[in-house]
Amino acid sequence: MRNIYFVGTAGSGKSTLVKTFKQWLDDNGIDAITLNLDPGADRLAYSADIDIREWISLGEVMEEYSLGPNGAQVVAADLMAMNIHKLTAVLNEYRTKYVLIDTPGQLELFAFRESSNMIVNALGSDKSMIAYLSDPMLCRRPNGFVSSMMLSALVQFRLQLPMINLLSKIDTLSEEESERMMNWFENPDTLYGDFLDEDSNPQTVVGLELFKALESTGVFGEIRGVSSEEETGLEEIYSSAQLAFFGGEDAERD
């Protein structure tokens, strides 16, 4: 059983991609289940096999602790870690190849709280990876792109798991836009040049410093475009999982 955490900012398309990738695995004879870790989700694009909302209700947390939605999300994130034994008990009843894990829409709740490390360790950090979704709406300009890459690097730093970078919802982009963003990631010199072209923007200096810091960490290299709407990039996610978990060998298909 291998875990793939789908992580990204709110609106980046995590839940929809979980649904589409699960269907792709089913169609290819690869057994997988879905796990929702967002206690504040109003509705999901898929029917979760395991759902944290069965144990934690955001509405009940708000009422019990006299909190607003944001404060309740923070408390709920910690309650997830406290109830992780209930979740793992249910998870251990399954015999499956992959667990597709949908994380909270508020990225900071999953990436920057210690409770998330407790959850990852309980589910098995040695058999887990991250699929990080970058929202193309944030990445259209160089400073937004660097901001997204900074969040991606921080998530990997915090959780210390193998990661695949995904540019989500590429069906909303023109071919020129998607190629430009992909090129920024694969050829950082191009991104640097486009930053310089925006030198009238007061954020450019800060962005350039962030760019230099990211480049020195080796975060740039390869990003894959995915679209749940057009069902593209799904095989690339699977191939990356094979590489992370099995050194590139294809897992046995049912």
Image (cartoon, helix red, strand yellow):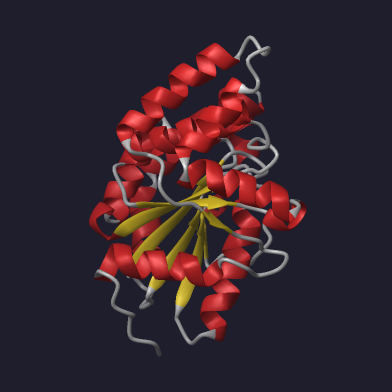
The answer to whether residue 76 is seen in the rendering is no
Q: Count the marks: how many?
A: 0
Query: Can you give x and y, in whole percent of width and height, for residue 243 in the image?
Result: 31, 66
Rendered residue at 30%/62% (across/down): 244
Rendered residue at 56%/49% (across/down): 182
Image position of 102 with respect to 146: above or below? below
Quarter of the figure with residue 4: bottom left
- Which of the pair 200/143 is nearer the observer? 200
Rendered residue at 51%/77% (across/down): 25
Image position of 49 with respect to 130: above or below? below
Image position of 29 with respect to 34: above or below? below
Query: Can you give x and y, in whole percent of width and height, for residue 83 in the image?
Result: 39, 46
Q: In this view, does 170 lie to the left or right of 88?
A: right
Query: Can you give x and y, in whole percent of width and height, for residue 140 in the image?
Result: 68, 37
- Which of the pair 198/231 is nearer the observer? 198
Image position of 84 with respect to 21: above or below? above
Quadrant containing the N terminus is bottom left
Quadrant containing the C terminus is bottom left
The answer to whether residue 149 is seen in the rendering is yes
Query: Can you give x and y, in whole percent of width and height, for residue 100 in the image?
Result: 47, 63
Q: Outermost residue toward the top?
A: 202
Rendered residue at 70%/47% (across/down): 177
Q: In this view, does 23 lie to the left or right of 28?
A: right
- Which of the pair 148/49 is nearer the observer? 148
- Which of the pair 230/84 is nearer the observer? 230
Q: Outermost residue toward the bottom?
A: 254
